[in-house]
Image (cartoon, grey):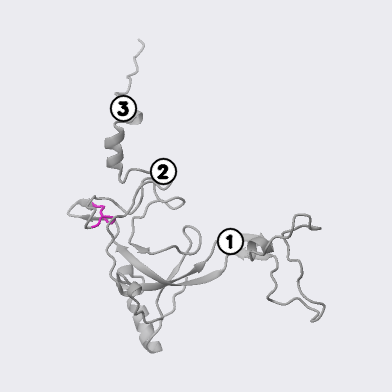
């Protein structure tokens, strides 16, 4: 993945890149809280699709000859060619897209060790002081655990899980109230995303459910084998 450098002369760009060669560039050094950014990526691929799914063309009546998920007329006799604006079957999804104006709600720090103690509170807020990580119980579906720095955006982003995205500074000057207002999150839900989750942390689940069978089996002493003389 390549990222373009903007601003300054060619020599200044080369010097900037040489200073940061093989060094970690954190997301907090590029973006900041409450900033509006653009997200560039490739959408989910859906393969070959017809006009009803691809362009949401209206279905024809039930008794239509040779199918009804079609376009009834693809153009007049003359001009003797199909216009580009006519809905046709073809590839749906896996397209390069740029989504504008995504607001940054939080820039979280990775799980870190301070004074010999593991710090796991990057999902806590001033209103919810429970020590918990951004990873929900059981992990994110089709992804796993988030142990590095993360960025939380408003809304969704394009593509499947684990697909590479490009985050870009906005090219516009934002003056609206929605873009400039400060955001302070009160609560971040970390329940399980695999079902109807109800517990925020593993400790909360353990205190409610009590000791499980597998926990009791781990505490039982292993049976000793008797020696046959």
Mark number, residue 196: 2
Q: Which residues are magenta?
A: 119-125
Q: Which residue is pictured at 22% across the width and 55% down the height? A: 127
Instruction: Give the crowd class for mark 2: few <14, some 14-19, many >=20 residues within 10 Å.
Output: few
Q: Which residue is pictured at 30% across the width and 45% down the height? A: 201
Residue that mark 1 sits on: 45
**Horizontal and vertical percent for residue 159?**
50, 62
Mark number, residue 216: 3
State the residue in front, 83 or 91.
83
Q: Relative to 170, is 223 above or below?
A: above
Residue 122 drawn in magenta: yes
Q: Relative to 74, is 12 above or below?
A: below
Element carrying mark 1: strand
Query: Which of the 4 quarters of the picture holds residue 179?
Result: bottom left
Main secondary structure along the magenta-highlighted residues? loop
Give the CA separation, mark 1 to mark 2.
28 Å
Label 1 vs 3, first from the N-terminus: 1
State the residue in front, 172 or 1.
172
**Horizontal and vertical percent for residue 32?**
30, 71
Give the CA separation, mark 3 to mark 2.
26 Å
Residue 148 drawn in magenta: no
Q: Which residue is pictured at 30% across the width and 31% down the height? A: 211
Dot in front, 1 or 3: 1
> Can the viewer see residue 206 in this picture?
yes
Element carrying mark 2: loop
């Amino acid at each position: 993945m390549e990222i373009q450098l903007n601003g300054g002369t060619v020599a200044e760009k080369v010097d900037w890149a040489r200073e940061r060669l093989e060094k970690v560039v954190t997301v907090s050094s590029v973006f900041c809280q409450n900033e509006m950014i653009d997200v560039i990526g490739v959408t989910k691929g859906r393969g070959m699709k017809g006009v009803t799914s691809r362009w949401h063309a209206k279905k024809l009546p039930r008794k239509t000859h040779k199918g009804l998920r079609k376009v009834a007329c693809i153009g007049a006799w003359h001009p003797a060619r199909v216009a580009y604006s006519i809905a046709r079957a073809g590839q749906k999804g896996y397209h390069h897209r740029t989504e504008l104006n995504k607001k940054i709600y939080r820039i979280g720090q990775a799980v870190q060790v301070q004074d010999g103690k593991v710090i796991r509170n990057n999902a806590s807020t001033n209103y919810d002081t429970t020590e918990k990580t951004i990873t929900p119980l059981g992990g994110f579906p089709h992804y796993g655990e988030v142990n590095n720095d993360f960025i939380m955006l408003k809304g969704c982003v394009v593509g499947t899980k684990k697909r590479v995205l490009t985050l870009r500074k906005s090219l516009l000057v934002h003056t609206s109230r929605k873009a400039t207002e400060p955001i302070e999150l009160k609560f971040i839900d970390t329940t399980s995303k695999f079902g109807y989750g109800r517990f925020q942390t593993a400790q909360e689940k353990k205190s409610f459910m009590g000791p499980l069978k597998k926990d009791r089996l781990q505490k039982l002493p292993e049976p000793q084998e008797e020696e046959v003389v």
